[in-house]
Each structure stands twice: as structure tokens, then as C-alpha cells.
Amino acid sequence: MPAPVPVWWDVAQDQATLTWNCGTVDADSYSNEKEFYVFNNKGGASDVSDMTNVFITTKDTNGNDAGPVAGPTPVAAVEVSVFDGVSWGEWKEIRGSDPANQAVVVNASGDGQAVIKGNRNISDPTDTNYNNPETKKKYARLKLRLHVFASAPAGPMSWKTRISYQYT
């Protein structure tokens, strides 16, 4: 079966996105919250593999455990809240390769599974009815925010927020 096709979806803009701009965030404060859906195979006409053991973390721009947000001594932290199908979870700092600093991502169906299904949209490949019970298994709902610590120096910061998964 083909590999998963993950898509980050900006809820406010109602479109796919590759970036998240937090804007200017003062030291010792938080950015505005930003909501995303992470789809597998959005609008797909044929099945792809499921994303399993899904989690979210941050890395530096080279994909390493370094930098101002993903390093061992960060000056800021990305925080995530994951919707479990019923309610939003607690905010959790995410960074690097240590599982203790990552967050499990569950699909929006409420089944508690860290699996984002890759099945095709049965009735319509462009289905945007996010409340359809089968569609809810094809995406996760996340809120992200940046917490800039009081010790942060002035200037821009860059990092990657990554969804990681396995598939067969």
C-alpha cells in the first residue's frame, strides 16, 4: 500500500499549510494559539497506509535536537494541546527525540488511538465534512502555541514542528 500522505491544515485559513508564523512574542509570554488539523490522505481517491504511533515534537531547522526551541537548554518551547474527540488535553511542551518531551497524537474520533487512517473518502474525494464519523479517524486536531521564556534573547527563532509516525 502507498505511504501515508500527511497534510497540515490551517483551521482559521481553511487551507493546507507548510508554515506557522507565531509573530512577535515578548519574553516571558505566549503566542496566540493556532489550531491545525493533521490529515492523512485528505481528498484521496484511493487508500494509503495508516499513520500509526503518531506523535508530535520539535526539531531545529536541520532536523536535530538543537536550537532555541528544540535544544537541551531552550529559550522557548512549543506547547501542544491535542483534542481527544471529546475535549482538549493539557498543554505539553514538546521538543527533541526524548519520548518524555513528545506528545502522542490521537485521531479526532474519540477512539483514543494514535492512528490516523489513510482510507479514501468513500462518498466524495473532496469531503470537507469534518464531523463525519469515518472522516474523524482520518485527522487529528491540535492547538499549538509558543512560550518564550524570560531568558530569551531578542531576535527571530526558527524550528520545525514535526508529526512522526510509522506505517506498513
Image: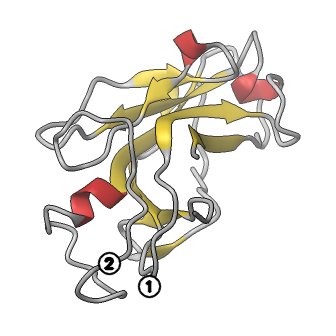
On the image, numbered disc 1 is attached to which residue? 45
Q: Residues within 10 Å of mark 1 (few under 14, many from 20)?
A: some
Q: Which residue is painted at 22% across and 37% down in the image?
A: 84
Helix, strand or loop at label 1? It is loop
- Pinpoint residue 27: horizontal percent, then vertical percent: 60, 26
Q: Is residue 61 above or below residue 45?
A: above
On the image, numbered disc 2 is attached to which residue? 121
- Pinpoint residue 103: horizontal percent, then vertical percent: 46, 26
Q: Which residue is painted at 33% across and 50% down in the image?
A: 141
Q: Is residue 19 above or below residue 90?
A: below
- Pinpoint residue 73: horizontal percent, then vertical percent: 75, 10
* Nearer to us in this view, 37 or 92: 37
- Pinpoint residue 22: horizontal percent, then vertical percent: 57, 50
Q: What is the count of numbered marks?
A: 2
Q: Are marks 2 and 1 in contact (CB under 8 Å)?
A: yes
The amino acid type of the residue labelled 2 equals Asn
- Labelled disc at residue 159: none
Say left or right for 123 vs 164: left
* Nearer to us in this view, 157 or 85: 85
Q: Tell me how far mark 2 sits from mark 1, CA to CA.
A: 7 Å
Quarter of the image where one finds residue 61: top right
Quarter of the image where one finds residue 62: top right
Q: Which residue is painted at 20% across and 77% down in the image?
A: 129
The amino acid type of the residue labelled 1 equals Ala
Q: Which residue is painted at 22% across and 69% down in the image?
A: 130
Q: Along the polypeptide, which appears first: circle 2 or circle 1?
A: 1
